[in-house]
Image: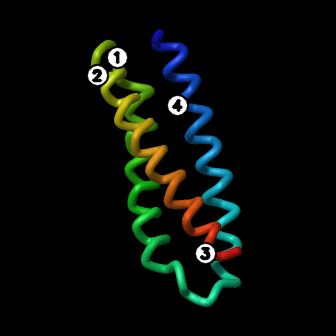
């Protein structure tokens, strides 16, 4: 996988997660508190995603690949968490 492919994939994932996060955040204000703990955990993951995404711009070579893989894994975990929260809010 090339660096451009990884960067493009990661950028798409982060953008998707941001949209999903923003949508859920607006719904949480209307919720009854059932998912507060899950949301807190998801927010911690989001902070990790943001930090690694910012670092990705500065990293090069093998480090970029490692950060990209870590970010992809965190992103997938966060996506699952958001889906769980969405299911509980529905």
Q: Residue at the spot x=40%, y=28% of the render?
A: 68
Q: Earlier in the sequence, mark 2 or mark 3?
A: 2
Which numbered disc, 1 or 4, marks the residue closer to the eye? 4
Q: Position of residue 71 (x, y in %)?
A: 41, 37
Element on which disc 2 rests: helix
Q: Is residue 50 visible?
A: no
In this view, 55 is above or below 6: below
In percent of width and height, residue 35 lies at 52, 78
Kindly state the secondary structure of the residue where label 4 is placed.
Answer: helix
Q: Is residue 59 above or below residue 44?
A: above
Q: Which residue is mark 3?
A: 88
Residues marked 2 and 1 touching at CB (< 8 Å): yes
Residue picked out by circle 2: 63
How far apart marks 1 and 3 lie (CA) works out to 40 Å
The reply to whether callout 4 and callout 3 are in contact (CB within 8 Å) is: no
**Residue closer to the observer: 40 or 56:** 40
Q: Nearer the viewer, residue 50 or 6?
A: 6
In the image, 38: left or right of 19? left
Q: How many residues crowd mark 1 within 10 Å: few (<14), some (14–19), many (20+)?
A: few
**Where does label 4 land, which residue?**
10
Mark 1 — residue?
Answer: 60
Please state the total of marks drawn on the protein image. Answer: 4
| Up-down relation of residue 2 to residue 63 (above or below) | above
What is the number of the mark on residue 89?
none
Q: Secondary structure at mark 3?
A: helix
Mark-to-mark CA distance, 4 and 2: 15 Å
Distance from the alpha carbon under mark 4 to that under mark 3? 27 Å
Instruction: Give the structural element (helix, strand or loop) at label 1.
Output: loop
From this viewpoint, which residue is outermost toward the top? 2
């Amino acid at each position: 996988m090339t660096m451009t492919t990884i960067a493009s994939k990661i950028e798409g994932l982060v953008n998707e997660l941001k949209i999903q996060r923003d949508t859920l955040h607006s719904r949480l204000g209307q919720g009854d508190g059932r998912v507060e703990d899950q949301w807190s955990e998801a927010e911690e993951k989001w902070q990790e995603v943001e930090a690694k995404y910012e670092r990705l711009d500065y990293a090069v070579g093998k480090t970029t690949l490692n950060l990209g893989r870590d970010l992809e894994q965190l992103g997938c975990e966060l996506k699952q968490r958001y889906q769980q929260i969405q299911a509980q809010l529905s």
